[in-house]
Image (cartoon, rainbow, N blue to C red):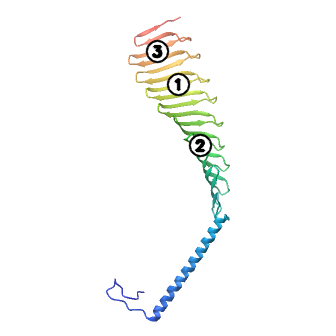
């Protein structure tokens, strides 16, 4: 309802009559009064909420004190809590039964993140150890079964049995990669190394002693089998000059030497 000249129109519109003008202004002031009343209600509600939170009073949705903030779902489906403790702040997430299922804490030795099952067992833990990061993955009983960790020497991947004892390692460092598989008695069973000059595979007997070794470098490949006293028993070597086989007695002395040039040996 334009009541004056319209600059966008070619022809000016007629002016309001006195009664029409009075009616429009009455409607305008009525609408304005309703808006002001609504704003007053919202401001009063906000004032009461701030006063209640400052006093630490509980509400269905949240509570604020000097050390903790709780946020609750109105339908009872969960809760989040932020606290400021002596050791630092923490964020805690709860399920509908009030069980903590996840947390993020700033502890004395660094930050820590945990994911838990309904019984409270930690299934995944991420934390700092000696200034390096560590990730633990646990079984449903809460016992760690795998770990990834950074150390001053390089990265480490470790797997454990139900008792928490390591059964295998994978290590990466500036010198190369290493893999070691352990027996249930925590003895080395199989070792593999990859360095700048080549790779090596070692097989161990029950007590951890090396019984066979397979290695390779730019010059040759070498297979060595050892006796139960650690002596060299059989050696196979292949290089630029061809193949070479050595067979030794239980004292490590060569009794048979086979090469591309012939066979030498002492037979009893």
**Depth check, front residue: 223 or 159:** 159
The residue lying at 66 percent from left, 65 percent from top is 55
Mark 2 and mark 3 in contact? Answer it, CB < 8 Å.
no
Asked whether the viewer can see residue 32, the reply is yes
**Depth check, front residue: 6 or 227:** 6
Up the image or down, 94 lies above or below 34; here it is above
Q: Which mark is residue 245?
A: 3
Q: Residue furthest top?
A: 268
The residue lying at 44 percent from left, 9 percent from top is 263
Q: Which mark is residue 168?
A: none
| Picture quadrant where residue 108 is located | top right
Q: Is residue 241 left or right of residue 184?
A: left
Q: Sequence order check: which comes first, mark 3 or mark 1?
A: 1
Residue 178, given in percent of the width and then of the height, sits at 51, 31
Mark whose residue sits in front, 3 or 1? 1
Crowding at label 3, few (<14), some or many (≥20) Cα neighbours within 10 Å?
A: some
Q: Which residue is mark 1?
A: 202
Residue 114, given in percent of the width and then of the height, sits at 61, 48
Q: Sequence order check: which comes first, mark 2 or mark 3?
A: 2
In what element is the residue under mark 1? strand
Residue 30, given in percent of the width and then of the height, sits at 53, 85
Mark 3 and mark 1 in contact? Answer it, CB < 8 Å.
no
The span from disc 2 to disc 1 (Cα, nearest Å) is 29 Å
Q: Is residue 6 left or right of residue 202?
A: left
The span from disc 2 to disc 3 (Cα, nearest Å) is 47 Å
The residue lying at 53 percent from left, 25 percent from top is 202
Q: Residue furthest left?
A: 10
The span from disc 3 to disc 1 (Cα, nearest Å) is 19 Å
Up the image or down, 233 lies above or below 185; here it is above
Q: Residue furthest bottom?
A: 18
Q: Which residue is mark 2?
A: 137
């Amino acid at each position: 309802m334009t009541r004056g000249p319209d600059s966008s129109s070619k022809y000016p519109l007629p002016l309001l009559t006195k009664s029409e003008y009075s009616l429009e202004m009455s409607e305008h002031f009525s609408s304005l009064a309703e808006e002001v009343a609504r704003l007053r209600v919202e401001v009063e509600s906000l004032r009461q909420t701030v006063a209640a939170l400052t006093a630490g009073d509980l509400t269905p949705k949240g509570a604020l004190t000097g050390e903790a903030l709780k946020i609750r779902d109105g339908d009872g489906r969960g809760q989040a809590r932020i606290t400021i403790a002596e050791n630092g702040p923490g964020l805690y997430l709860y399920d509908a039964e009030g069980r903590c299922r996840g947390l993020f804490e700033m502890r004395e030795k660094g930050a820590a993140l945990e994911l838990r099952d309904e019984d409270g067992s930690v299934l995944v833990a991420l934390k700092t150890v000696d200034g390096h990061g560590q990730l633990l993955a646990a079984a449903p009983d809460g016992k760690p079964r795998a770990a990834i960790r950074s150390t001053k020497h390089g990265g480490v991947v470790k797997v454990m049995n139900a008792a928490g004892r390591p059964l295998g390692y994978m290590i990466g460092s500036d010198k190369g990669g290493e893999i070691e598989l352990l027996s249930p008695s925590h003895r080395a069973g199989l070792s593999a190394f990859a360095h700048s000059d080549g790779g090596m595979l070692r097989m161990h007997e029950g007590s951890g002693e090396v019984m066979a070794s397979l290695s390779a470098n730019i010059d040759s490949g070498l297979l060595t089998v050892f006796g139960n006293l650690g002596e060299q028993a059989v050696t196979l070597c292949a290089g630029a000059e061809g193949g070479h086989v050595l067979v030794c007695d239980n004292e490590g002395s060569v009794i048979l030497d086979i090469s591309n040039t012939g066979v030498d040996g002492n037979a009893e």
